């Protein structure tokens, strides 16, 4: 069984195994079998069954090494991204069922960490959720790190000491959206209704956008979503300037969250 850096372990095929077997027989017994004359001999009949089994074992061995390599890749990924790093903390929150984002570290914030968690403060169980979130933060932040935020819980650590742990709630911006769809002159399919387009746009945003991410209008609706269109344009307006429509990427802070609602979407057809 050969090994290559690109493909890993490569099982030997049956024909190669049979050729090696034939050469050994010629060497041992002084015969002069060729590939053509070897087929049909008793040696060939016995060797073929053995070669099949041998090849199956090599395939199984190769699969073991592939799985082992995948395991090493996963472990190395976890080692290179420990839970106390920003991506690790976000991932850990995701495992626990929360969406979180972290403020990028700057020199002025040395020793401090700011975490924002997308949770509804109006939830009837919010106090329990707050305690659960801050308990999680106490478990995944490095000792000595001071957490920042408005949502505070006193957590008793394993050494019996009590410390305050904190996080931020999202700064929800109730964004206005305007989707302009230009009908293609070559269209031969049924044109979707404006209401259907609103629902589809909202679904795309919910699937592709989250807390702390920049709002990139071109990501949430394209011609592939409206095959009867020759062009689509998504614009947004902020509550502070509802008549100013923008298409540029919105550079969001870690705690900002565009709150897109169906009633705030307008569809314009040209």
Image (tube, rainbow, N blue to C red):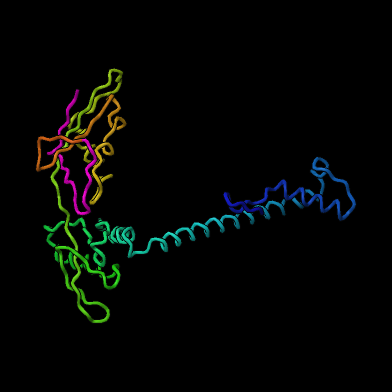
For residue 191, what is the image quadrant? top left
For residue 157, what is the image quadrant? bottom left
Q: Is residue 218 magenta?
A: no
Closer to us: 223 or 257: 257
Residue farthest along the right direction in this orientation: 30
Q: Give the residues drawn in magenta, as a range.
A: 247-270
Quadrant housing the N terminus: bottom right
86 relative to 193 in the view: left or right: right
236 relative to 12 in the view: left or right: left
266 relative to 225 in the view: left or right: left
Above or below 123: residue 227: above
Residue at x-position 31% and y-position 31% = 224
Q: Position of residue 189 (x, y in %)?
A: 29, 23
Residue farthest along the front direction in this orientation: 107
Q: Position of residue 103 (x, y in %)?
A: 24, 57
Q: Is residue 249 magenta?
A: yes
Residue farthest along the top direction in this orientation: 185
């Amino acid at each position: 069984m050969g090994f290559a850096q690109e493909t890993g372990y490569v099982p030997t095929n049956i024909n190669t195994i049979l050729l090696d077997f034939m050469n050994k027989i010629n060497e041992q017994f002084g015969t002069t079998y060729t590939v053509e004359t070897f087929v049909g001999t008793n040696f060939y009949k016995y060797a073929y069954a053995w070669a099949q089994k041998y090849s199956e074992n090599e395939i199984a061995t190769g699969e073991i090494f592939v799985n082992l390599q995948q395991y090493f890749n996963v472990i190395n990924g976890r080692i290179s991204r420990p839970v106390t790093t920003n991506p690790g903390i976000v991932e850990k929150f995701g495992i626990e069922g929360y969406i979180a984002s972290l403020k990028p570290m700057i020199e002025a914030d040395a020793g401090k960490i700011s975490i924002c968690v997308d949770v509804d403060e109006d939830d009837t169980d919010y106090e329990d959720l707050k305690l659960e979130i801050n308990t999680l933060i106490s478990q995944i932040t490095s000792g000595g790190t001071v957490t920042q935020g408005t949502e505070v819980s006193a957590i008793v650590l394993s050494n019996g000491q009590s410390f305050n742990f904190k996080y931020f709630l999202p700064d929800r911006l109730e964004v206005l959206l305007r989707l302009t769809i230009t009908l293609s002159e070559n269209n031969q399919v049924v044109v979707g209704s404006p209401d259907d387009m609103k629902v589809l746009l909202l679904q795309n945003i919910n699937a592709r956008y989250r807390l702390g991410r920049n709002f990139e209008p071109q990501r949430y609706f394209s011609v592939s979503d409206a095959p009867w269109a020759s062009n689509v344009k998504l614009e947004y307006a902020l509550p502070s300037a509802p008549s100013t429509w923008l298409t540029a990427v919105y550079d969001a802070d870690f705690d900002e969250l565009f709150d897109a609602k169906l009633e705030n979407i307008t569809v314009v057809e040209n």
